[in-house]
Amino acid sequence: MLLLVGFCFAQLLELFPSLHFIIKCVGVWLLFGSLLKRVLNSAEGMAIFNYFMAGLLVFSVIPAVGEIMSQLQQM
């Protein structure tokens, strides 16, 4: 019986940090979503958001294109 209780307690200690991390992530996601909702209510805010996301997309593609170009030059 004592072994069973110890095993359950060990599982609980292992599970708690995971739940703690998940709750924090969900909280940040909800906070970000509520703040973003305020920005996206206006046409100006939506345009700024779209330009910002387009810029992030371009900057994320640049390293991949550079890698492809360097591999093509080595051929």
Image (spheres, rainbow, N blue to C red):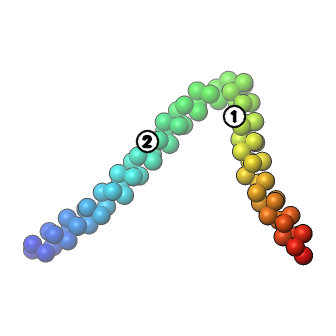
Name the amino acid, label 1: Phe
Q: Measure the C-alpha gap from mark 2 to mark 1.
A: 22 Å
Q: Tell me where residue 13 sits by quadrant.
A: bottom left
| Quarter occupied by the N terminus | bottom left
Badge 2 is on which residue? 27
- Against 59, residue 18 (above or below) is below
Side of 70 where 16 appears, left or right: left
Where is residue 19? Give x, y as percent: 35, 54
Front in this rendered view, residue 3 or 56: 56
- Name which quarter of the figure residue 73 lies in: bottom right
x, y percent for residue 34: 52, 32
Mark 2 Cα within 10 Å, few/some/many (few <14, many 20+)? Answer: few
Determine whether, in the image, residue 5 is placed left or right of residue 14: left
The residue tagged 1 is: 49
Q: Which of marks 2 and 1 is nearer the N terminus?
A: 2
Q: Residue 39 carries which label?
A: none
Q: Nearer the viewer, residue 52 or 19?
A: 52
Q: Which residue lies furthest to the left in this view?
A: 1
Q: Regarding mark 1 in the picture, which secondary structure is present there?
A: helix
In the image, is residue 42 above or below residue 20? Answer: above
Residue 35 is left or right of residue 48, and the answer is left
Q: In which quarter of the image is residue 4?
A: bottom left
Using a 10 Å C-alpha cutoff, classify the residue at mark 1 as few (fewer than 14 neighbours), some (14 to 19) or many (20 or more): some
**x, y percent for residue 10:** 23, 67
Q: Give the residue type at disc 2.
A: Gly
Left or right: where 40 falls relative to 28: right
Q: Which residue is drawn at 78% across and 48% down?
A: 58
Tell me the SS state at disc 2: helix
Circles 2 and 1: CB atoms closer than 8 Å = no
